[in-house]
Amino acid sequence: MHVRRGFLGWGVFLILAGAVPLLVRSGTISEDQVGRLWSLWPLILIGIGIGLILSRTRFDFVGGLVVAATLGLMAGGLLSSGVDRLSTSACGSDSASVAFPAQDGTLTGETGSVDLALNCGDLTMTAAAGSEWHIEGSDRNGIGPEVEADADSLRIKSQDDDEPWWVLGTRESWRIEVPADERLEVDLELNAGSSTVTLPGARLDTLDLVLNAGSTRIDLTSIAAIGGVDFTLNAGSLNLSLPAVSMTGTIQANAGAVKLCAQPGVALRLETGESIVASYDYAEEGLVQDGSVWSTPGFESAEVKIDLRTRANAGSFTLNPEGGCG
């Protein structure tokens, strides 16, 4: 029997994506074990490296199999437990019960940078009038995150720990307020957890997000201005309420699910990827297809235009879902 290598990777992916939910239902593996599957994502990089090394040999397909198997296990975990359960299991369920001292400061530079890196926890981020920033919350020991700040930048990251972040046992909880009156570049990294970002009146040059095994809700409906977004989801879910101002950007979902909610009167142009294990429902919202691009009729002449590259690898994009993006 001859096996076509072109379909071998997809076969491995689909077999594992279907096998994981069956094993969970039969009790062979527990949901806690499934919650750790997302942490296999570094194997994707290893598989790519193997593929490069063996690219001129008869074993050049091995790297692709490693990538396909990893994505299959991650997708199976999502199907059996959902993203919220997956991130909770991976992060740990112990509560962050000890309040840490609040910290405040100001950003007064021409363009301030805000960098947040949270490992295992929950983030609530909002904006308020003025130039001040504020952080409060709780963690396992009441020490709080590491904060570095000056007039031009604010950097907040989880405490250093001897254990890798994917095996932490206690969640952190951050509540952060950033200044709405200052132009900002915001960079968020969330590893295993959840976040809610609402930025009324904020003026952003850029908003970047890297989400590993977590869920995020971002509400840009009341933002004053935004240049662009760059979001990457690895085994994550994103609910994004789009603004009523023009912007561009990229959203990449690797084994993830994205919900987009657009405001009335805003024209959309959404470019899709070519993965056969990705889904987009843009036609149901009246967008017109031209190759890999879906657009609102009359996009070019619209006053407010949002132009996004939406790419999914083993994921989905849903536009204006029935339940909204809240």
Image: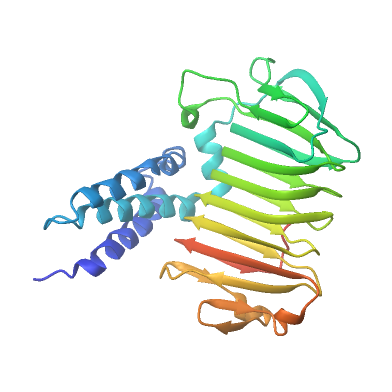
Residue at the outermost front position: 110
Residue toward you, 244 or 152: 152
Q: Residue at point 50% right, 29% down?
A: 165
Q: Is residue 125 left or right of residue 193?
A: right
Residue 315 vs residue 266, the one in the foreground: 266
Q: How far across and down, in percent of the image, does residue 238 sit? A: 62, 54
Q: Nearer the viewer, residue 254 or 300?
A: 300
- Where does the C terminus fall, quadrant-wise? bottom right
Q: Residue 296: give x, y in percent of width and height.
A: 69, 80
| Rendered position, 56 above or below 199 | below
Up-down relation of residue 262 to residue 202 (above or below):
below
Question: Quadrant of residue 270 in the image?
Answer: bottom right
Relative to 30, does residue 299 appear above or below in the rendering?
Answer: below
Furthest residue toward right = 129
Residue shown at 75%/40% (left/top)?
A: 125
Q: Position of residue 46 (x, y in %)?
A: 30, 43
> Can you tell which quarter of the image residue 267 is in?
bottom right
In the picture, measured across the screen, residue 291 lies left or right of residue 181, that is: left
